[in-house]
Image (cartoon, rainbow, N blue to C red):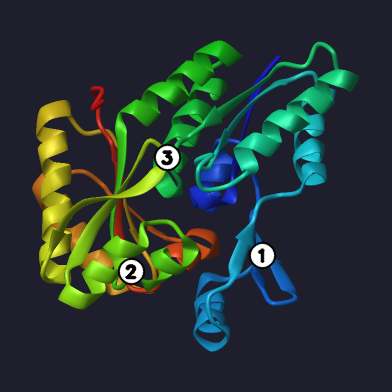
Amino acid sequence: MAVRILTDSTSYIEKNIESQLDIKVISLNVIFGNESFKERDIDNEVFYKMMEEKGIPTSSQPSVQELYDEMEKVVQNGDSILCIFISSHMSGTYSTAHMVKELILESYKNAKIEIVDSTSNCMQLGFSVIVAARAALEGKNLDQVKEIAEDNIKRSRFLFVPDTLKYLKKGGRIGSASALIGNLLKIIPILTVEDGVTTILTKVRTKKKAVATMTDKMFNDIEQYGVGEITVHHINAYYEALELIKTLEEKLKIKIGICSIGPVIGTHVGPGTIAVAYYTEKNMR
């Protein structure tokens, strides 16, 4: 009996890696008025143009039926499944998955399903999925694969620098007072995700300084705990991301990935965002 891995679209794992590691992905949705799109079905460039024209959309989790269908496919085949999803504080996906698990167990008494709250999104979520999928392909059992995913979460961090806090403020992802102070004083925050919620790591005066402070934090973590893998995220800031990758690769002497943040998370942080997601060899928490 094999272990299959299911995650959601906010992991933003490259399609070729999903295929290589047999990772199943279920999509969240973005909604402009009466129009709803699966995040996986809309091109990032098209989406951000739509956001400029139509304003900030809302987002929604996968339906109960979609989650049920994905889980059922796995258990019908006699395999076990590990689901790793976006922070339960950011989406109802994790909670709904638990409800769906109980529905599955009503029909498939011997089904083995585990569900992990990544407490984050983007490639902080993605890395836990990737290491779990690698372990599954090595033949490890469900409990072992789950432990590897949870261990990776303890060793990972997501740091990001938005161009503006207006998207976070509108989406309710950060306190309105912090957003107001940042806008009035022209302070740029370095944000992170801890315990499943977006928080401010520190604030500086310019975006250039914010990106430098963000990378210094990562270097300090790596110096203390070692380096695993790193991805640079961006939203409509491709060349800025490439410049950051060049700097990091010259210093660290490792290959670093690049990944555009998609519509669901992009809705809340906005264009111009630059970010790093990484994990270390030792536990940071």
Q: Which amino acid, mark 2? A: Leu
Mark 3 or 1, nearer chain start: 1
Image depth: mark 2 or mark 1 in front: 2
In the picture, the disc for residue 281 is none
Residue pictured at 50% horizontal, 77% vertical: 48
| Residue 1: quarter of image | top right
**Crowd around label 1: few <14 · some 14–19 · many ≥20 (10 Å):** few
Q: Report how many numbered discs are placed on residues in the image.
A: 3
| Residue 240: quarter of image | bottom left
Query: How far across and down, in percent of the image, does residue 71 sit?
Result: 76, 32
**Crowd around label 2: few <14 · some 14–19 · many ≥20 (10 Å):** many
Left or right: 21 in relation to 272: right
Measure how far apart labels 3 and 1 are at the Cα level: 26 Å
Q: Which amino acid, mark 3? A: Gly
Mark 2 or 1, nearer chain start: 1
Left or right: 285 in relation to 57: left
Query: How far across and down, in percent of the image, does residue 5 sit?
Result: 61, 31
**Crowd around label 3: few <14 · some 14–19 · many ≥20 (10 Å):** some
Residue pictured at 52% horizontal, 19% vertical: 145
Image depth: mark 3 or mark 1 in front: 3
Query: How far across and down, in percent of the image, does residue 68 sit?
Result: 80, 37
Q: Which residue is mark 1?
A: 41
Measure how far apart labels 2 and 1 are at the Cα level: 27 Å
Q: From the viewer's perspective, is residue 88 above or below residue 58? A: above
Residue pictured at 15% horizontal, 59% vertical: 203
Q: Is residue 24 visible?
A: no
| Residue 212: quarter of image | bottom left
Query: How far across and down, in percent of the image, does residue 6 sit?
Result: 63, 35
Q: Which residue is mark 3?
A: 196
Left or right: 220 in relation to 244: left
